[in-house]
Image (cartoon, rainbow, N blue to C red):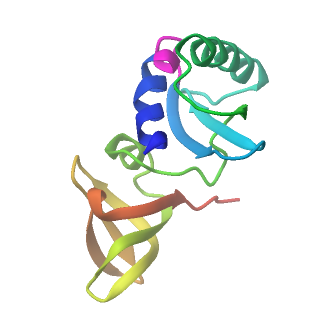
Amino acid sequence: MIGDELLKLLEPVIERQGYELADLEVKLGGRNGLIRIFIDKPGGVGLEDCEIVSGQVSTFLDVEDPVPGNYTLEVSSPGLDRKLRKAEHFQRVIGEEVTVKMRFPVLGRGKFRGILKEADEKTILVFVDGEPYELLISNIDTARLVPSF
């Protein structure tokens, strides 16, 4: 899995610059490969932050050459509907509305949309229509923050 391997390689490069690697998308093959990096930091991310990280990551990828073929590198903020991957991501948004898609059904459900009430290193507690659901983070396929306006 090139995405997981690349995530492990890039995380320390990005963290040394004072940013968090919030997410990574990798689509390779043909002439239109893409590596999209989402970075974050307290207070949010601006264009200058993306430029700094892009320069560092680009240099790292040129020197180490861990990715075969041609690709475009993009660096962006995670956005309002940011993905939640790690326990720390969930812990930061306790009290907020989230959507969660599971790899395997929990109590007959595969999708959940509700308020995140708790998060520890292994599980999250989401209230959907007043009903609590304890979900294993390792069983989550995708989770996102629902933007509130």
Q: Residue at x 49, y 24 (%)?
A: 10
* 10 lies above or below 36: above
* Part of the protein shown in magenta: 13-19
Quadrant (top left, top right, bottom left, bottom right) of the N terminus? top left
- The one nearer the camera, 10 or 89, is 10
Query: Residue 136 occupies which quadrant of the picture?
Result: bottom left
Query: Residue 135 occupies which quadrant of the picture?
Result: bottom left
Residue 4 located within the stretch drawn in magenta: no
User: Percent position (x, y) of residue 120?
Assistant: 23, 49
Residue 14 located within the stretch drawn in magenta: yes
Q: Residue at x 54, y 27 (%)?
A: 42
Q: How many numbered callouts?
A: 0
Quadrant (top left, top right, bottom left, bottom right) of the C terminus? bottom right
120 left or right of 56 in image: left
88 left or right of 31 in image: left
- The one nearer the camera, 5 or 124, is 5
Please indicate, yes or no, whether residue 82 appears anywhere in the rendered image.
Answer: yes
User: Percent position (x, y) of residue 95?
Assistant: 43, 57
* 27 lies above or below 44: below
27 left or right of 104 in image: right
Q: Residue at x 47, y 32 (%)?
A: 6
- The one nearer the camera, 110 or 88, is 110
Residue at the far bottom: name it.
108
* 125 lies above or below 130: above
- The one nearer the camera, 93 or 27, is 27
Q: Residue at x 37, y 45 (%)?
A: 86
* 104 lies above or below 16: below
77 left or right of 108 in image: right
User: Percent position (x, y) of residue 33?
Assistant: 71, 42
User: Percent position (x, y) of residue 73?
Assistant: 71, 31
Please indicate, yes or no, whether residue 124 appears anywhere in the rendered image.
Answer: no
